[in-house]
Amino acid sequence: MTNEEYEKIREICKPHYYNINTNPLIDRMHWATYREELGENIVIKQENIGNYEVSTVYVGLDMGLFNPLPLIFETMIFCDDADDPLYLWQERYTYKDQALEGHERAVILASGIKNDR
C-alpha cells in the first residue's frame, strides 16, 4: 500500500482512540501512554448499591464501530448472579457529562431492583 492509499483510507475512517475530552489521539501507542498517565483517573465514578457495583469509566477506545460519534465512556452494573436482570448491564457514551448522567440512571436502576427484593 502506498502512502497516498493509506492517507485516503485514513480520511474516510474515523479515529479509534480518543482522550478524555473526546479529542482524537494519533494511534494506539499515544492512547496507551495517555491512559498510563491517567492512572486511576480512568474511573469516573463507582459505587456499591446492595449486591450491585455501578462503575463508569473512560475507555478511550471507540466502542461504537457503527455509531457516527465515538463511544469512549462506559457504565456497567456488576453483580454475582447471572440470572439477575441487571447482570452485566451496560451503556456507552461519547462525552464525560453523558457518562455521569448514565451513571446516575444505572444507580437508580440498581436501587430499584435492590428495593424490590
Image (spheres, rainbow, N blue to C red):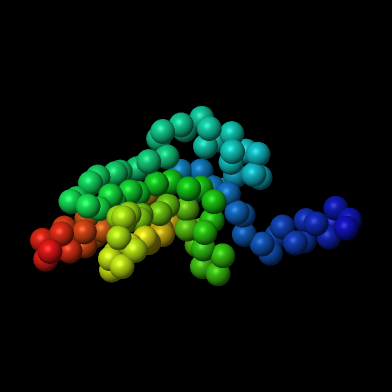
Q: Quadrant of the C terminus?
A: bottom left
- Place of residue 52 in the rendered image (x, y in percent of width and height, measured from the top left): 25, 53
Q: Quadrant of the N terminus?
A: bottom right
Res. 106 image quadrant: bottom left
Examine the rendering and report whether any part of residue 9 can be seen.
Answer: yes
* Residue displayed at 40% across by 35% down: 41
Query: Above or below — where is 110 with respect to 60?
Result: below
Left or right: where 111 falls relative to 40: left
- Place of residue 21 in the rendered image (x, y in percent of width and height, measured from the top left): 45, 45
Q: Residue furthest right?
A: 2
- Place of residue 74 in the rendered image (x, y in percent of width and height, measured from the top left): 40, 54
Return the residue nearer the eye: 67 or 53.
53
* Residue displayed at 70% across by 60% down: 11
- Place of residue 113 in the rendered image (x, y in percent of width and height, measured from the top left): 17, 64
Res. 92 image quadrant: bottom left
* Residue displayed at 52% across by 37% down: 35
Examine the rendering and report whether any part of residue 100 can be seen.
Answer: no
* Residue displayed at 35% across by 43% down: 44
